[in-house]
Each structure stands twice: as C-alpha cells, then as structure tokens.
Image (tube, rainbow, N blue to C red):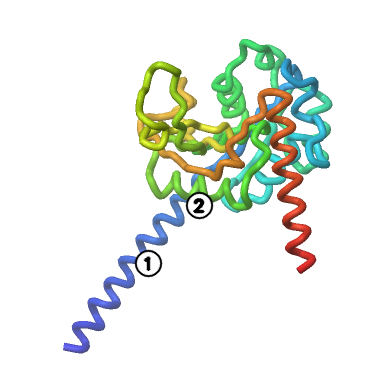
Amino acid sequence: MLKTFEFFNHLNFNIISDFVLRISNFILFMKILGITPARGGSKSIYKKNINPLAGKPLIAWTIEAALQSKLLNEYLVSTEDSEISAVAKKYGAHVLDRPKELATDEATSLSVLQHVLKNKPADIVVLLQCTSPVREAGLIDRCIQQFLDSHADSLATGFVCKHYEWGTYSARRQHLEGWFHDDGSVYVTKAECIHTGALWGEKKEHFITTREQNFEIDDEFEFWLNEKILDDHARVQSLTHEH
C-alpha cells in the first residue's frame, strides 16, 4: 500500500513538474516588449516629455520603471525628436527612430506600435506612456503577470470611475456602480491584436491601481499635481531611511 502511494505521489510530482516546466518554457520563449512613445511636438506643455519633473525629465520616470522590470525582454523609446532621443539614451533606454509622418497630431498610437513591431517583432506589447510618471515599484511586472495568469488579450491599469454626465443619474454617488476608466499608465496586449489593427482584444483584463497613480499628464495642473505626488513620495522615503 505504501509503495502504491509513493508511486502515485511520484507520478503527481512528475505531472506537476512537467506542467510548470511547460508554462515556464512558454513564458521563456515569448518576447515581451516594452514601448514608450514620445514625440517632440507637445501642444499642451512645451517639450513636455523632457520637461523637468521632481528632479528629472518626465520621460526618465517611465524609463527607470521599465528598466527595473524582470519580465520585459526588451524596452525602447519611439521618437522622432533628437532631444528626447538623447535624454532617453542618457537614462539607459534603447531608442527607435520614428518617421516624421508618425509624429504628427494625426498619427495614432496604433500606427506607432505597428511601426515598432515591424522593426522589433514581439509576442506581447507593454505600452508605457511617459505621461504617467507615478508608478509603484513592481507595477509593470504585476500587470504582466496578471495578464499572463488571466489569459487575457489585453490589460489596462485604471480605476473605478463614478463620474457621469449631469442629468443622467439620480442616485447618490456612493450607490453608483461605476465603470472602469483606464489611466494611461500600463497597457499589456497581444501583438497579434496590434497587427490586426486593434489596440486591445476581445478578452480585457482590468488592473486597479491606487488613486495617486491615476493622474495622466495632459495639462499644466496635472503636471504640477504629479510633481507634488512624487515630491511627497521622496519626502516619505527620506523619513523612512532616517528611522
């Protein structure tokens, strides 16, 4: 009886080990590419992507977060701008030169990602916009892991929004169900979706982040707000180290 138990126990161990090995090999042979699009022609804030924010250029916050990732196989910045290119390289990012026609107001994120994939083929794309500089340590890898675990086509970070157009609801805000609002920080999607002309696939996954990570920079006020958040983080970390 003991030998029979040991046989099945050994068999189960081998089955589990083989399954883990297959999953590990699946992830190992997938290429996960991180991309930060950064054009030079910002209209809302002059040279926004390299404007100083809490002690370093705006884009540097995203580059540093991406380079700390353990699951990204490669990371690059896509830009047509020589100044942005120089700053990105200074902070350790690879740069892919973007054609001028993909750096206009009419150019879409989809067209930029398709251009990157033509030059850098990948299985999974992680879009990291530099207009979302506040990211908790490990956020990018947690998003990728949830994407893989859920077998989703696409994943986005964001929050549950309870803002509706005035006159369309009468319930108290705390009783509203709300809806998921992506915050522009991290997007993970299968490259095949982008190849077929879509930024996301049919099966979508949501990754809820803390409120302070939800403020995407589109104007001067949001720039100021993100700087205050980052300065506060630095102050708290400084006090923690002192104690």
Label 1: how many residues lie within 10 Å, few (<14), some (14-19) or many (20+)?
Answer: few
Q: Quadrant of residue 101?
A: top right
Q: Position of residue 2 (x, y in %)?
A: 20, 89
Q: Quadrant of residue 168?
A: top left
Mark 2: secondary structure: helix
Instruction: Say which residue appears at 72% left-offset and 14% top-offset.
Output: 100
Amino acid type assigned to the residue bearing label 1 in the image: Ser
Residue 241 shows in the view: yes
Q: Nearer the viewer, residue 242 or 83?
A: 242
Give how far apart the Cα atoms at labels 1 and 2 are.
16 Å
Query: Which picture quadrant has residue 228?
Result: top right
Q: Residue at x 60, y 46 (%)?
A: 73
Q: Most extreme residue toward the left, as rendered?
A: 1
- For this view, does 81 lie left or right of residue 152? right
Q: Residue at x 38, y 46 (%)?
A: 150
Against 122, residue 233 (above or below) is below
| 221 to the left or right of 14 | right
Q: Depth check: give the residue in front, 70 or 10.
A: 70
Q: In the rendered image, is residue 78 in sight?
A: no
Image coords of residue 157 (percent x, y): 51, 38
| Circle nearer the N terminus (1, 2) | 1
With respect to residue 177, does 136 lie above or below? Answer: below
Residue receiving disc 2: 28
Expressed as whole percent of the image width and height from the top left, the position of residue 155 reads 46, 37
The answer to whether 11 appears left or right of 226 in the picture is left
- Name the residue: 79% across, 28% down: 84
Q: Is residue 189 above or below residue 109?
A: below
Which numbered marker is on residue 17? 1
Residue extending farthest bottom: 2
Query: Which dot marks residue 209?
Result: none
Residue 26 appears at what percent x and percent y?
44, 50
Q: Which of the image's four quarters has the N terminus?
A: bottom left
